[in-house]
Amino acid sequence: MTSSVLPISATVLTKNSERHLVRVLDALRGFDEVVVLDNGSQDNTLAIAGEYANVSIYHHVFEGFGKLKNRAAAQARNGWIMNIDSDEIVSDELMQSLQLIDFSEINKIYTVSRLNHYRGRPIRGCGWYPDMVPRLYHRSHTVFSDVPVHERIEIQKDSQLTALSGELLHYSYNGAGELLAKMQFYSDLYAERYRGKKSATTAQAVAHGVFAFLKSYVFKKGFLYGGDGWVISASVAANSYYKYVKLKEANEQPKP
């Protein structure tokens, strides 16, 4: 099959994303357009993005992932939108699968299997795989949920979910420091989002943390990955524990 330019606008949110960006954008050369929405990068992110003919660059302050992804989609010239993180690479097999899509079926939402990596190593345990995520949609049919964290493409009553073959390679964490930083970031957003809306106790935090570790390390076979599996499972447990602790503390603070 002869490949052709895909009538898709890929959207990529960036902030100091130079580490993987060349490989990310190289894999998107077959897309008609790539919309990069940057949130104050201080490294070479913008210089790298500017080297690609199919890349358009926009800027906006951080206001939550859902809102930013919808802003990026609104700038696109194509109706079909595929959201790609700045550390995710479209594999050759996934690109071939995209070439087979009937783009007239705008109520379809396409999911992809994301293969997460830790220190460059693919992880098919710890609850990280299979990580099926909806990523390709038509913006006249749906949008991302308007939430600061854990945003998802909204499934409509007439949506048809279709899985694509091929993996989205996710180079998410280069070490324990990045795992901990992401845990702090997401647990802060969780507490901010649910303050005054959900209750949380220390007992809940402990129970969720312990169960999260056992699920990741034992039931999801994190032990097969040695020390890396232990570190990943511990970070999963810490995230589950601290998001409830932070929510408890936020609920106990007087409202401004």
Image (cartoon, rainbow, N blue to C red):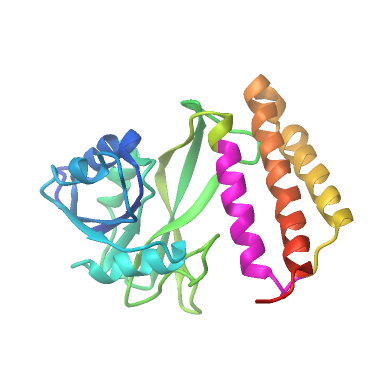
Magenta residues, dominant SS class? helix
Percent from the top left, x then y, of residue 139?
Answer: 33, 72
Residue 162 vs 239, above or below: the answer is: below
Is 196 magenta? The answer is yes
Depth check: give the residue in front, 84 or 68. Answer: 68
The x and y percentages for residue 20 are: 33, 35
Q: What residue is drawn where x is 40% and y is 74%?
A: 142
Q: Position of residue 25 (x, y in %)?
A: 24, 42
Q: Which residues are magenta?
A: 179-198
* Residue closer to the observer: 250 or 217: 250
User: In this rendering, does residue 111 appear at all?
Assistant: yes
Q: Position of residue 36 (x, y in %)?
A: 26, 55
**Residue 129 visible in rendering:** no
Picture residue at 79% right of the left edge, 38% below the top = 214
Q: Residue furthest left?
A: 53
- Which residue: 53% across, 36% down? 178
> Quadrant where the N terminus lies?
top left
Query: Which one is nearer the viewer's eye here, 53 or 181?
Result: 181
Q: Is residue 30 left or right of residue 134?
A: left
Circle count: 0
Q: Left or right: 199 with respect to 143?
A: right
Picture quadrant where residue 37 is located? bottom left
Does the magenta-highlighted stretch encompass residue 19? no
